[in-house]
């Protein structure tokens, strides 16, 4: 159950802050975000070595895209394409609005259900594909300013223990300050492994289960306002199978 948190602040020096935890089988091979695709030199994203796509990335135009499975749809399905391809297709675009419009027109029967977040420093969108039979169209919702959080269900829903517990905590925390390099508040929340007994391990932001399903990595992204002489920030750390410290990735 991957999770994305977005803070939209139009007019701010850093109008978009994004945090992400990726939950996956520990044994599924992957590589940290980098420019892995020779035919897509402008894309900086994590590489799923099994299917060839990505779960989260940023391009040189300042578009961010992240994919999440919906409940009950973990893993591939015969005859359907990898959802990780959608991140790369979104990052082929120079504008989040154009990317959302293009991907919403895809045939939903080609993919298992997903939540896809596409954003830049002006707009942010949630693409929702919830019908396993592919009968419904892919829905598009513009995200309002403020804090949004999503996992395997709907945006800001309270049925999922993780969202119910952590969305108020992210909302109450001091936002990261990319200008000074202070990310401590959100880094601590992404690393939190405490959970209520009734929720089970998956109620924590970071967890490991006895089935080798775990939070394998965390990421933080900040986009500067249009026209600013600032550079986007992409921070990353690994938890599984080999821990690594937070680092700013070279863009």
Image: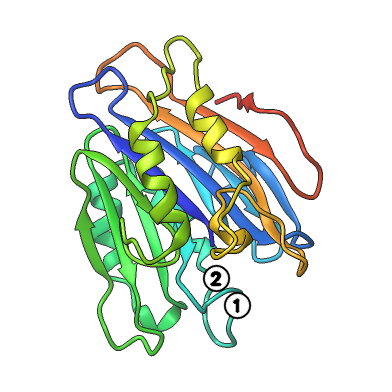
Task: Looking at the image, tell me whether mark 2 or mark 1 is earlier in sequence order.
Answer: 1
* Residue under the point 18% across and 45% down: 144
In the displayed structure, 48 sits above or below 225; it is below
Quarter holding residue 52: bottom right
Please tell me whether mark 2 or mark 1 is closer to you in this view: 1
Element carrying mark 1: loop
Label 2 crowding class (10 Å Cα cut-off): few <14, some 14-19, many 20+? Answer: some
Of residues 238 and 210, the one drawn nearer to the viewer in this rendering: 210
Of residues 168 and 179, the one drawn nearer to the viewer in this rendering: 168
Label 1 crowding class (10 Å Cα cut-off): few <14, some 14-19, many 20+? Answer: few
Q: Position of residue 117 (x, y in %)?
A: 36, 53
- The residue that label 1 is drawn on is 76
Q: Is 175 left, or right, of 205 in this rendering?
A: left
Spatial CA span between label 2 and label 1:
7 Å
The answer to the question of whether label 2 and label 1 lie on touching residues, with beta carbons closer than 8 A, is yes
In the displayed structure, 164 sits above or below 146; it is below
Q: Is 58 left, or right, of 200 in this rendering?
A: left
* Residue under the point 31% across and 56% down: 156
In the displayed structure, 138 sits above or below 221; it is below
In the displayed structure, 221 sits above or below 211; it is above
* Residue under the point 43% across and 80% down: 110
* Residue under the point 52% across and 37% down: 189
Of residues 196 and 139, the one drawn nearer to the viewer in this rendering: 196
Element carrying mark 2: loop
Count of marks, rendered view: 2
Q: Position of residue 34 (x, y in %)?
A: 63, 38
Q: Position of residue 96 (x, y in %)?
A: 29, 46
- The residue that label 2 is drawn on is 82
């Amino acid at each position: 159950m991957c999770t994305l948190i977005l803070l939209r602040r139009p007019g701010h020096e850093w109008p978009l802050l994004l945090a992400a935890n990726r939950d996956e089988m520990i044994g599924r091979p992957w590589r940290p975000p980098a420019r892995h695709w020779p035919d897509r030199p402008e894309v900086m994203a994590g590489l799923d070595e099994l299917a060839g796509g990505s779960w989260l990335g940023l391009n040189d135009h300042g578009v961010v895209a992240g994919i999440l499975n919906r409940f009950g749809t973990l893993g591939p399905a015969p005859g359907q394409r990898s959802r990780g391809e959608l991140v790369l297709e979104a990052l082929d675009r120079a504008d989040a609005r154009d990317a959302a419009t293009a991907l919403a027109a895809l045939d939903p029967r080609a993919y298992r259900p997903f939540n896809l977040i596409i954003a830049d420093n002006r707009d942010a969108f949630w693409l929702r594909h919830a019908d396993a039979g592919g009968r419904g169209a892919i829905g598009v919702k513009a995200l309002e300013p403020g804090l949004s959080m999503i996992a395997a269900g709907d945006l800001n829903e309270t049925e999922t223990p993780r969202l119910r517990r952590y969305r108020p905590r992210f909302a109450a925390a001091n936002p990261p300050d990319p200008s000074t390099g202070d990310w401590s508040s959100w880094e601590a929340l992404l690393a939190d492994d405490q959970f209520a007994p009734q929720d089970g391990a998956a109620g924590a932001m970071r967890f490991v289960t006895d089935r080798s399903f775990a939070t394998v990595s965390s990421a933080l992204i900040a986009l500067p306002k249009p026209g600013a002489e600032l550079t986007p920030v992409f921070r990353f750390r690994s938890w599984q199978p080999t821990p690594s410290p937070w680092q700013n990735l070279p863009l």
